[in-house]
Image: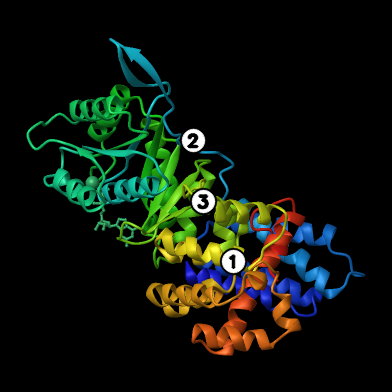
Amino acid sequence: LADLGSRLRGALSSVESASDDEINSMVKDVCTALLESDVNIKLVVRLRDNIKAKIKTELSPEETTANKRKKLQKIIFDELVALVDSHEEPPKPKKLSTSTKVINGKKKKVAKTNSHVIMFVGLQGAGKTTSCTKLAVYYKKRGFKVGLVCADTFRAGAFDQLKQNAIKASIPYYGSYLEQDPVKIAYEGVTKFKSEKFDIIIVDTSGRHRQEQQLFDEMVQIGEMVQPTQTIMVMDGSIGQAAESQAKAFKESANFGSIILTKMDGHAKGGGAISAVAATKTPIVFIGTGEHVGDLEIFKPTTFISKLLGIGDIQSLIEHVQGLNLQNDENHKQTMENIKEGKFTLKDFQNQMNNFLKMGPLTNIASMIPGLSNIMSQVGEEETSKKIKNMVYIMDSMTAQELESDGRIFVDQPSRILRVAKGSGCSAVEIEMVLQQHRLMSTMAKSAVAAGGAPGAPGANP
Ligand code: GDP
Ligand code: MG
């Protein structure tokens, strides 16, 4: 969807004087870009009408150009979000809460809550098995105890595929080469992991080439046996607008609550799938963006549109970092406190960069930060990781006083830049870049607080 993003950004930045002509042609460009990404024409027409109506009521001729541009950006942003928003909240897994009981004179841990059981459904080749492992790894990274169950006995080699993925990612798995009944395997696997107090149990099921009764019957039976907390339909995102009818057909048989759209890497039709699915009022929870285990991105309408428009999204950044089990990290606590107050020191910046390095696929994270997403798209994962490491080294050469500051100290006393450059073995230009990047993020932190923490508020774009 990189193409759609760059076209939308181009349309928005083409507004200079905010004259009526300019605004009209911008709206037209936005609509053309959406149509060419295969978004349903009815939805695009509605979006256009909403934008025009809002422009009429919210933009007055007396306003400054800067104000007009800000408001325009907000209008477009909100309407794009509305386009991909199902307005439904998917269930969120929680860690199992346990208590200690004395049984036969021995202390034993007993579960007070139930494991979160996720059942995957979808056609063959949609990406279920791949996404199962991706999701397991995603939750494992966030401190959950996750197990995988292979209930696909239809396709030869299905268990091997899941097993290999699971072993590679060090995720406990359950399956059988001999048992032919998927319902039985699913039940046994879930029961086993439940008794071992797993927080999350993911059940992979078999698909069929087409929507067949046999497939739907099997899904219903497995569902009855394992009583999933959440059923996720996995769908190939490259099918474009056809996503809507497929989601509807599955919904009638297997009442799923969330969707993962896969193969969203490099498909112009992705916009079609996203808007089609949003129209079925089912939340897309993740999108798959590649064949590797890390290629899974959270899908949230505001985050998605922020990324698409190249606007950083401080809210998801905070959530992302919060999800990483850093509660006991003192540096991290201080940074979170500061961000909540709209403060963001260089030390906070350094902490964040260090966290990014711990977090794995940088593509996901970089796109939440304005500026970084550009670097990322130009040079790729490895190079970006190097750049971030470099930033951390540069900040290592700063004094405590400098790190605790908002960075102005370098503007007031430029000789400090030269000292840091010397200490870190980098050029003064590189130090300036770090300071500039910090200013960008600091502005985001401030405007996020000013906007009441509104996620991805376009005002946050400096
Ligand atoms: P299943 O039959 O639904 O279990 O589908 P699989 O998980 O076996 O995936 C089918 C194919 O799609 C495999 O070759 C995967 O590597 C590929 N695949 C799955 N998700 C993605 C994705 O997000 N992007 C890309 N490019 N390929 C994917
Ligand atoms: Mg499979």
Residue 173 pos. (x, y %)? 22, 40
- Which badge, 2 or 1, is on the more N-terminal residue? 2
Quadrant of the image occupied by residue 339: bottom right
Mark 3, residue position: 329
The numbered disc on residue 349 is 1
Residue 72 pos. (x, y %)? 75, 66
Whole-angstrom CA distance, mark 2 to mark 1, is 32 Å
Please determine whether, in this image, residue 48 is positioned above or below residue 424.
above
Please determine whether, in this image, residue 167 is positioned above or below residue 228.
below
Element under disc 3: loop
| Identity of the residue drawn at 34% across and 62% down | 290
Whole-angstrom CA distance, mark 3 to mark 1, is 15 Å
| Identity of the residue drawn at 66% across and 73% down | 402
Residue type of the residue flagged with mark 3: Asp
Q: How is the image coloured?
A: rainbow
Please give left or right for residue 393 compared with residue 117 in the image: right
- Which badge, 3 or 1, is on the more N-terminal residue? 3
Whole-angstrom CA distance, mark 2 to mark 3, is 28 Å
Q: Nearer the viewer, residue 31 or 364?
A: 364
Residue 443 pos. (x, y %)? 70, 67
Q: Quadrant of the C terminus?
A: bottom right
How packed mark 3 is, by other alpha carbons closer than 10 Å (few <14, some 14-19, many 20 or more), is: few
Q: Nearer the viewer, mark 2 or mark 1?
A: 1
Please give left or right for residue 30 compared with residue 273 in the image: right
Element under disc 2: loop
Numbered disc total: 3
